[in-house]
Amino acid sequence: TALMFYFIFGRIASIPTQGIHPFLFYFSGLTLWGYFSDVFTKCSNTFVGNSALFGKVYFPRLAVPLSIVISGLYKWMIQSIVLLVVLIWFQVSGVENINVHWSLALVPLYILLLALLGFGLGILFSSLTTKYRDLSFLLAFGVQLLMYGTPIIYPLSFTSGMMRKLLEWNPLSGILENFRYALFSVGSFNLGGLVYAVAFTLAALTVGILVFSRVEKSFMDTV
């Protein structure tokens, strides 16, 4: 996917990437986006996809989406290792001079935020789809749109005015921008975006768990 983005958005569309090599720019963004979207989409199918299992035996229903969050970490770790190898190759070959920032130590926090945000939103939508089944189709389309509403193929500095304000409302924007800053020391550390992401994540997680706990008591009547 990063290679495809490189040719389409980097070579053909020539979208600026803040001086970062386009392939590295896209690859780093997709590494985080892949984990979030995987957790979000799979957790949103918790009730509908596991209705047969839930109807046979009782166990804490949150165990299913939590297992998705944990299993997704393995795929993210593999992608991160590949990203690390690519970064080393670009550095050694002299194609790109990688300047790592001290904020790289905050990467575990970024991953935790992505996990909790995907988990919270996922179980919230999973609860809603027990009653509104067609919402699952809208969700799949919405995730695709969200990717283009997140600074993955372009930096936040590429936008301005109302468009930038809208993108800043996306909690993923601050996480991705800070992650790239940690890897390449390009741009600036967005503390406000990080604080907003933490607040949004906690709110989504709280609402998601409350709605999930309420729906799990009677979801078998509607699934």
Image: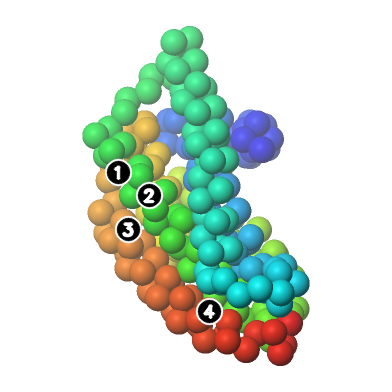
Label whose residue precedes the other's in the sequence (1 or 3): 1
- Real-space CA distance between mark 1 and mark 4, rounded to the nearest whole angstrom: 30 Å
Label whose residue precedes the other's in the sequence (3 or 4): 3
Res 159 seen here = no
The residue that disc 4 covers is 212
Which part of the image, by quadrant, shows the N terminus? Answer: top right
The residue that disc 2 covers is 110
The residue that disc 3 covers is 193
- Give, as a three-letter code, the residue at label 2: Tyr
- Real-space CA distance between mark 2 and mark 4, rounded to the nearest whole angstrom: 24 Å
Residue at the outermost top position: 93
As displayed, is residue 145 above or below residue 92?
below
- Residue 147, image x, y percentages: 58, 55
- Residue 59, image x, y percentages: 57, 71
Q: Nearer the viewer, mark 1 or mark 3?
A: 1
The residue that disc 1 covers is 106
Q: Quadrant of residue 40?
A: bottom right
- Give, as a three-letter code, the residue at label 3: Gly
Res 208 seen here = yes
Q: Secondary structure at mark 1?
A: helix
